[in-house]
Image (cartoon, rainbow, N blue to C red):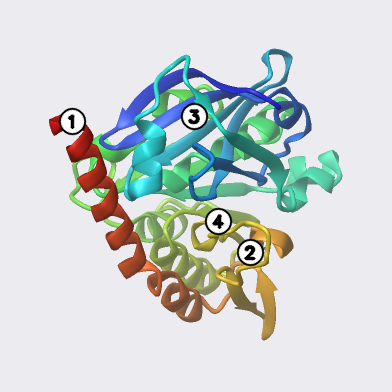
């Protein structure tokens, strides 16, 4: 049985952690856009997480997780030297650009738009492009400056790094879609492609903005995934009038063809179950501490 050791753990922002996991096979095969599924222990839930980075020579896979529910809280309670029961991947289809002609990609003006924890899966895509001499811009959004993650890592890849915060504490005052509109309409930036990754609502409104601006766009629908194999049907989404499954047909799709309202409704139907599981986990932990 494979042993998936936690090699490194960092607090990136309140309740947001990065973890380096020893998983040589995944590290060797992973491409930008793909994800893994992990289980903390034999009784744990399956947690789909997009791959943030890999170090093939060291067998490391970096994931970023926000502790919001029982399973993710259990995961981030683990420390360096602890082990994870299952770590399966890479899963899903890689980003379409990895199969494009590099010369043609170098001619394009590419913009990445990230929101919240969705900033993390942008990193392997940007790193892949940087390694191949492809130019790009990045616009990152968060509620406040303290929730912006990976700024130092992104700054090593590009000088064209823009920020937007809801409260105006850093960069553009407003949502990331408004920042993109400002870049295009007021600063004269032009883009041939926008890759959008973040919370569902953020992706919806950013896609609406890029459609209005005439910028072809891609979104990653990893936030809607639950089981990660297509068997549970939780990630069923309508794209261009056709039914797709984010985990096996994606996770990346044409942003302007996704029925976001349907996807958001589907995502919200699990909220009560998540709250119940979180309450059970807190009771369990409290009992262990007080016992």
Mark 3 burial class by Cα count in 10 Å: few <14, some 14-19, many 20+:
some
> Distance of mark 2 from mark 3, alpha carbons?
27 Å
Which tag, 2 or 4, sits closer to the chain's start? 4
> Distance of mark 2 from mark 4, alpha carbons?
7 Å
Position of residue 166 relative to residue 171, above or below, is below
Q: Give the residue pinned by disc 3.
A: 154
**Horizontal side of residue 50 vs 181, given as left or right:** right
Q: Give the residue pinned by disc 2.
A: 246
Q: Give the residue pinned by disc 1.
A: 289
**Residue visible at 34% across and 30% down in the picture:** 77
Image quarter hosting the N terminus: top right
Q: Give the residue pinned by disc 4.
A: 222
Image quarter hosting the C terminus: top left
The one of 91 and 191 positioned closer to us in this rendering: 91
**Which one is closest to the eye, mark 4 or mark 3?**
4
Q: Are marks 1 and 2 in contact (CB under 8 Å)?
A: no
Which quadrant of the figure has residue 49? Answer: top right
């Amino acid at each position: 049985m494979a042993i998936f050791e936690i090699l490194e753990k960092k607090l990136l922002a309140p309740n947001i952690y990065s973890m380096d996991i020893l998983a040589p096979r995944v590290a060797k095969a992973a491409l930008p856009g793909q994800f893994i599924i992990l289980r903390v222990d034999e009784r744990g839930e399956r947690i789909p997480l997009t791959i943030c980075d890999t170090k093939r020579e060291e067998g490391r896979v970096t994931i970023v997780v926000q502790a919001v529910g029982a399973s993710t809280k259990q995961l981030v309670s683990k420390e360096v030297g602890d082990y994870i029961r299952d770590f399966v991947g890479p899963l899903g289809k890689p980003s379409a650009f990895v199969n494009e002609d590099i010369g043609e990609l170098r001619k394009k003006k590419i913009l990445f738009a990230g929101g919240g924890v969705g900033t993390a899966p942008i990193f392997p895509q940007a790193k892949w492009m940087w390694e191949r001499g492809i130019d790009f811009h990045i616009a990152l959004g968060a509620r406040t400056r303290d929730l912006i993650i990976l700024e130092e890592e992104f700054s090593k890849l590009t000088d064209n790094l823009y920020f937007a915060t809801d409260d105006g504490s850093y960069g553009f005052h407003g949502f990331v879609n408004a920042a993109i509109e400002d870049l295009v309409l007021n600063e004269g930036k032009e883009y041939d492609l926008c890759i959008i990754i973040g919370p569902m609502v953020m992706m919806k409104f950013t896609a609406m903005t890029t459609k209005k601006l005439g910028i072809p766009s891609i979104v990653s629908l990893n936030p809607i995934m639950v089981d990660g194999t297509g068997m549970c049907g939780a990630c069923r989404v309508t794209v261009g009038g056709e039914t797709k499954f984010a985990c096996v047909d994606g996770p990346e799709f044409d942003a302007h063809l996704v029925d976001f309202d349907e996807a958001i409704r589907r995502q919200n139907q699990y909220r009560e179950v998540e709250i119940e599981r979180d309450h059970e986990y807190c009771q369990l932990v409290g009992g262990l501490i007080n016992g």
